[in-house]
Amino acid sequence: MKIRKYIFLLFLFYSYIPVLAQVDTAWVRRYNGPGNGDDVAVALAVDKDGNSYVAGWSYGNGTFEDYTTIKYASNGDTLWVRRYNGPGNGDDEPKALAVDESGNVYVTGESDTDTGMFKYNDDFVTIKYSSSGDVLWIKQYNGSGNGDDNARDIKVDRSGNVYVTGDSYGGVTAYDYTTIKYYPNGDTAWVRRYNGPGNSQDGAWAISVDGSGNVYVTGYSAQNSVYPYNEDYATVKYDQNGNQLWVRRYNGPAGLEDYASGMGLDGTGNIYVTGESRDSISYDDYLTIKYYPNGDTAWIRRWDGPGNDDDDVWAIAVDSVGNVYLAGETEVAPLSPNYDFATIKYYASGEIAWVKTYGGPVHYGQANGIALDSVGNVYVTGFSGGSGDFDYATIKYSPNGDSVWAIRYNGPGNSYDDASAIIVDQAGYVYVTGESQGSGSSLDYATIKYKQCLAKPGDANADGNILLPDIITIINFLFRSGAAPNPLCRGDANGNGNVLLPDIVYLINYIFKSGPAPLKSKECCL
């Protein structure tokens, strides 16, 4: 009884000690192409076995920019590298990557396919690789106007059908949305083009496919045939056979430029579209729309950051129950040159759950990618100003918006490092890729795998802090048949693999005597 009173009295004089963030680097893999020029990774995927895939463009030896796709094993070993140089021997730039349940890999983008002298017309080029890196097929699409065609996004359904979208030159219709469905063997199922009312600039940026094979495409579409084009959001739904079911356009209150750049679906088929919308007072704002499956508008939400200036969304994620997560950049103050990460969570109702910003050391950065794990934690990555130039910056938020950890990567060139994509696998490992200044080279691919401590030793009651109640939880477990910490490693403060009286003593020293922090446990950490 005296010991308990003593502990409670001490507690009155000490503030709580938060759980320390625990994330480590499992591996970093860099790729410098044969041309020793700029190598820029733009897309990332992970399969069910923990293999990771990166796609981007890389300078070849006399081949300019080539599609370059890499597969890494879970331990970071390079399993294969595949390069593609189009027939025009010019710039070939992939924009998106997908992996199916069998480990087949799909890459799409734009490729110089014109072999004529001083001709640089790009076409859609989509490649399917087997899990071992063999080329299964390559498909090219040249629009009716025989001009530039740029694929921007790709999805694969559960049957192995492949869906690609982007913008394609149609001649008299200028640039149109162009969406293609390929069968698993590469045969074309259908091609659909969308020409907006301005008969001018229409560019699709994102595609989604639901469980019934319906296809959703969003991007921007011009109101006018001449400048200023005053683009609108334009979202199109097709059925599995390519029949157009509906088109929904959004023109912001200023009647100016509105660019949709991302979309997602929830578990009941609702559609979420986001991007930037020009306001005559506050410049660009985050603008997010929820549509029901029949195309009716559920809600529209506009967010203007604290600087009342430009706020641009670069990534979206949607969970199964319709919570929506956005990541991008916000100007920190009026007329300021500085930008912070801005991450927003909306509930399915459209109500804001939370808004979080990250400024880093110098308040200049941009979030480019966002991912969710199976329990609703949110992961954001991008570039952030550091001691040299820009660093990768990756942040984890809890479902309620608390910052769990932040980790930065400064490449060997101590210069420009910009993360473009992020993904979290089923085990909780976090993968990030992008471009990073090398030492003695130009920009290189830099792909990182992070390992987390998913449960924190010392946080015995799992409330997110290390406090007196954690000591009491262990006492009750050891001496009063109370519930065990879940998982048990939460009570293993001294890291010896057991939960015993020394763990209680260890926590008392940590909380009340400035002793060492609880040690990492293999059982709690990946």
Image (cartoon, rainbow, N blue to C red):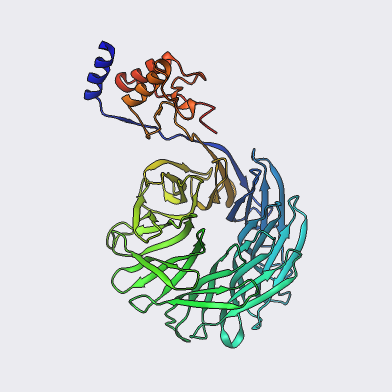
Q: Residue at x 61, y 45 (%)?
A: 30
Indicate the position of residue 194 as horizontal and vertical percent values.
Answer: 56, 80
On the image, which quarter does residue 242 sit in?
A: bottom right
The extreme bottom residue here reads 172
Q: Is residue 389 left or right of residue 99?
A: left
Q: Note whether 192 is above or below 164 in the view shown.
A: below
Residue at 47%, 59% in the rendered image:
316
- Quarter of the image with the C terminus is top right
The answer to whether any part of residue 338 appears in the image is no
Position of 256 compared to 425: left or right? Answer: left
Task: Note whether residue 164 is visible.
Answer: yes
> Relative to residue 384, is residue 508 drawn left or right?
left
View extreme (front): residue: 481
Front residue of this view, candidates 250 and 237? 237
Relative image position of residue 342 (x, y in whole percent): 38, 55
Q: Provide residue 49's location: percent of width, then percent of height.
A: 66, 43
Q: Could you tell me which quadrant the N terminus lies in?
A: top left
Number of dots carrying numbers = 0
Q: Quadrant of residue 11?
A: top left
Is 5 rendered above or below residue 211? above
Q: Nearer the viewer, residue 265 or 412?
A: 265
Residue 504 placed where, x, y %? 38, 17
